[in-house]
């Protein structure tokens, strides 16, 4: 069975209580549960991981090589700063979809830049927790196109 890694970066462990007016009231545990259920419907195994540490996120991306066929990444604030995360994604050559709960382009100018976007198939932002499920759909379509069964 194909496997997808859903990777969340700093402060996303606080979902549900962190600025609910911006990020919604859904917890990370609920997001992860929904991703696994949606993955099952699409025929994917979904593994979820969250870290507040840049190096741990990079290690997770490296470890995905040979194990996961796709990555969904919400890198939180590292999105706007981390050339290292961008390089890690480029290095492993695993198709990735970038997700943000909020519409980063409608927020402060420093959130408009994404290093992740340079290494991703595409970006989904502004649809709250639903964005993760849209990203799973996008990855499923991409993988089916790349290797039709
Ligand atoms: C975020 C947007 C980032 O700018 C912010 O630093 C986050 C969350 C989002 O999901 O909307 O931590 O990635």
Image (cartoon, rainbow, N blue to C red):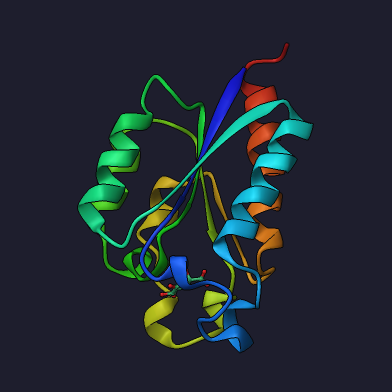
The total of numbered circles placed on residues is 0
Res. 110 image quadrant: bottom left
Q: Nearer the viewer, residue 111 or 34?
A: 34
Q: Nearer the viewer, residue 116 or 66?
A: 66
Point 39% across, 19% down: residue: 66
Instruction: Quadrant for the C terminus, please.
Output: top right
* Furthest residue toward top: 149
Res. 4 image quadrant: top right
Left or right? Give the position of 144 relative to 14. Answer: right
Q: Nearer the viewer, residue 57 or 34?
A: 34
Vertical arrangement, residue 35 with respect to residue 113, above or below: above
Vertical arrangement, residue 45 with respect to residue 108, above or below: above
* Furthest residue toward right: 41
Place of residue 102 in the rendered image (x, y in percent of width and height, measured from the top left): 58, 75
Instruction: Quadrant for the N terminus, please.
Output: top right
Point 54% across, 77% down: residue: 105
Point 51% across, 26% down: residue: 69
Left or right? Give the position of 87 relative to 126. Answer: left
Res. 127 image quadrant: bottom right
Place of residue 10 in the rendered image (x, y in percent of width and height, measured from the top left): 36, 66
Vertical arrangement, residue 44 with respect to residue 137, above or below: above
Place of residue 115 in the rendered image (x, y in percent of width and height, measured from the top left): 35, 59
Point 70% across, 50% down: residue: 34
Place of residue 97 in the rendered image (x, y in percent of width and height, measured from the top left): 54, 47
């Amino acid at each position: 069975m194909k496997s997808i890694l859903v990777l969340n970066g700093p402060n996303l462990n606080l979902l549900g209580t962190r600025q609910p007016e911006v990020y919604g009231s859904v917890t990370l545990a609920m997001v992860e549960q929904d991703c696994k259920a949606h993955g099952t419907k699409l025929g994917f195994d979904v593994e979820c991981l969250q870290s507040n540490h840049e190096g741990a996120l990079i290690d997770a991306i490296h470890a995905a090589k040979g194990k996961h066929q796709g990555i969904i990444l919400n890198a939180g604030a590292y999105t706007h700063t981390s050339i290292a995360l961008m390089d890690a994604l480029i290095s492993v050559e695993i198709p990735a979809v970038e997700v943000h709960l909020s519409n980063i382009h409608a927020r402060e100018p420093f959130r408009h830049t994404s290093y992740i976007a340079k290494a991703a198939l595409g970006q989904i932002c502004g649809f709250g927790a639903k964005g993760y499920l849209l990203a799973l759909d996008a990855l499923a379509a991409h993988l089916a196109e790349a290797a039709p069964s």
